[in-house]
Image (cartoon, grey):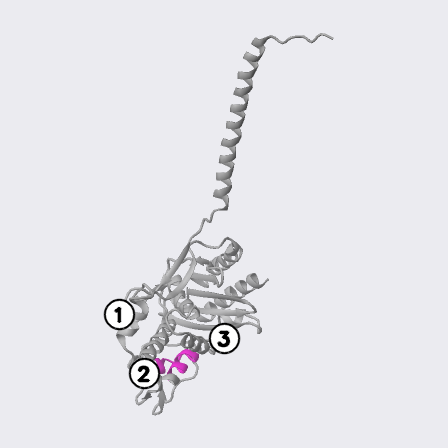
Amino acid sequence: MLKKKVPVYYFLIIIPLFSLAMYFGCYYYFNNKEVSDVAEFKSTAPTCGVTVKRLTDYKYIQPLVNYEKSCEAESLQPVRQEMEQTIENYKQSGVLSTASVYLRVFGQGDWVCINDAENYRPGSLLKVPELITFLRWNEKHPGYLNKVLTYSQPFISNKHTNFNSKSIELGKSYTIRELLKYMIEYSDNNATILLNNNMDAKEFKNTFTELGFKEPDMAASDYPINIKDYSLFFASLYNAGLLTIDDSEFAMELLSHSDFKDGLVGGLPDSASISHKFGEAGDDNMHELHECGIIYSGNKRYEITVMTKGKDFSKLSDVIKNISKIAYNKLNG
């Protein structure tokens, strides 16, 4: 059988066309693959950095005080929304003028914050940086906590307290360690004033400035602060960033015995434990009630701070209790 011959000029046409088809096909494939790879890289790349707080006043080291993600956690948005709605409901009912909440889950650096721009008068919350100051001073001067002070005369104070507890007794002597217990566990103002009179002012100021806060005015009646900044004091204790491990543990143990039960504690089950401190401030026109604590529930540990302004202290404590309950239920649900 005879085979039909293919003219040579067919090849001269087909081969260039085939080459062009291969060229454009490869160009399209690899360019689209590059775009796809870039898109995939962008979608998996982290979108939130980490904020690290270190002490910088040392020559060879920079102790880690705290770290957290730079932006709010997406996973905590449901609890944030419920707390925000609860605050709005209290505002609509007239209980609240304003409130702020900071919630941080340890381990991942996840946090959310409501109304972080508002400043508050912390009141007895300042007893925590004072506790830190005395423990730091004792680290530099071992045995200082054993120094004995006498409560020899009553102190005159224009601060009226609504949540009173146990107090030191006039005419009796106490070690500084015992006075710290009264100051933290019972929020005793008499013990606090006695400690104030024997505290190194420079060391107290350093407790603030080393965390990046402004230097406190020792003559001022209070120290306005926002909720996120104040929460750093508790985080620094939990992370043992300002004190030794043993002293941080001692401080958190004292805070775990705080006998204020009308706020954060009321929103927790008996199975959970908490190291916490409350503070009250304000005047006849506007009351302030705040509380900060670290909650231990199984393997989960988280920090929550609630700061409030309103007309009625007892109702403000209910706000803190309900915010605490929301946080616990959402995080342990």
Q: Is residue 2 visible?
A: yes
| Type of amino acid under label 3 | Lys
- Tag 2, which secondary structure? helix
Q: Is residue 205 above or below residue 156?
A: above
Where is residue 21? Give x, y as percent.
Answer: 54, 21
Q: Label 2 belongs to which residue? A: 194
Residue drawn at x 48%, y 39% is 38
Residue drawn at x 38%, y 81% is 180
| Type of amino acid under label 1 | Asp
Q: Is residue 159 visible?
A: no
| Type of amino acid under label 2 | Leu
Label 1 vs label 2: CA separation? 19 Å
- 112 and 250: which one is in front? 250
Residue 261 badge: 3
Q: Is residue 66 above or below residue 178?
A: above
- 330 and 307: which one is in front? 330
Label 2 vs label 3: CA separation? 25 Å
Label 1 vs label 3: CA separation? 31 Å
Q: Is residue 91 above or below residue 266?
A: above
- Tag 1, which secondary structure? loop
Mark 2 neighbour class, 10 Å CA radius: few under 14, some 14 to 19, many 20 or more: some
Q: Which range of residues does the magenta coloring cover?
A: 179-192
Q: Label 1 belongs to which residue? A: 217
